[in-house]
Amino acid sequence: MDYRRTKYCPELIDVPQKKKEVEALVKAEHPYAKDMHNYISDNSQKFKLEFIKAYNGKCAYCGASNDLIKKTEFEIDHFLYEKAPIFATKKEAGYIQNLILACHDCNHDKNSFWIKKEEFEELNPDGEKIKNVFIRDEQYYIRINDKFKHNTTIEEFYKKLYLGSELHRLDYLIMNIIGLQRSCQNNSDLYVGLGKILDIIRQKRNIM
């Protein structure tokens, strides 16, 4: 199972195709647009909302959802960072498939981390392989799958984004409880009890 989603979250599928559809929306109104980042990162534009929908409202790296993050607080990351030597200008880095929906922490922690060509497919959050690179353990921490533990790029990526942190574990727990709470709205006692648990976990998260 994808480490970023809970049992209550829809599966992340066809992201590249959905991103192409967002690009088409941009070009319908701005035919000469090259740098998609300029349009999709703008909170005053509808394009960002459509981009968020392509990711089911979740950070593509850690899985934090819009139950935890305001839509305006999501950021648009350059998977291959915009000042990377392969790009002659920042505009070149703004092509649609290089843009990734991220929470503030993941975007800024990743920063200018360089993804080697050999690990591009494994670490690209739009693909399928990343779902096997990182897993959730029994305590809900994000871990590196044993098959990839000796890959230095993957290990550095994991550490750079603090994917194994307590914060990401608590976010996952909160999302699970919110999902469970929504599924039992007819049971008022359980609903209220889960709300109290949520308050306790959120307090713990907020002091970290």
Image (spheres, rainbow, N blue to C red):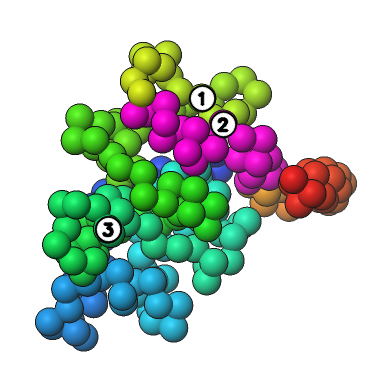
Q: Residue 35 lies in magenta, yes or no?
A: no
- The part of the chain drawn in magenta is 153-177
Residue type at numbered disc 2: Gly
170 relative to 100, above or below? above
Front in this rendered view, residue 23 or 86:
86
Residue type at numbered disc 3: Lys
159 relative to 88, above or below? above
What secondary structure is found at the residue carrying circle 2?
loop
Q: Label 3 vs label 1: CA separation?
A: 29 Å
Q: Position of residue 93 (x, y in %)?
A: 22, 61
Q: Nearer the viewer, mark 2 or mark 3?
A: 3
Q: Which residue shows up at 37% across the image and 28% down it? A: 154
The C terminus - image quarter: top right
Whether pointer 2 and pointer 1 mark residues with C-beta atoms closer than 8 Å, the reply is yes
Residue type at numbered disc 1: Arg
The residue that disc 1 covers is 143
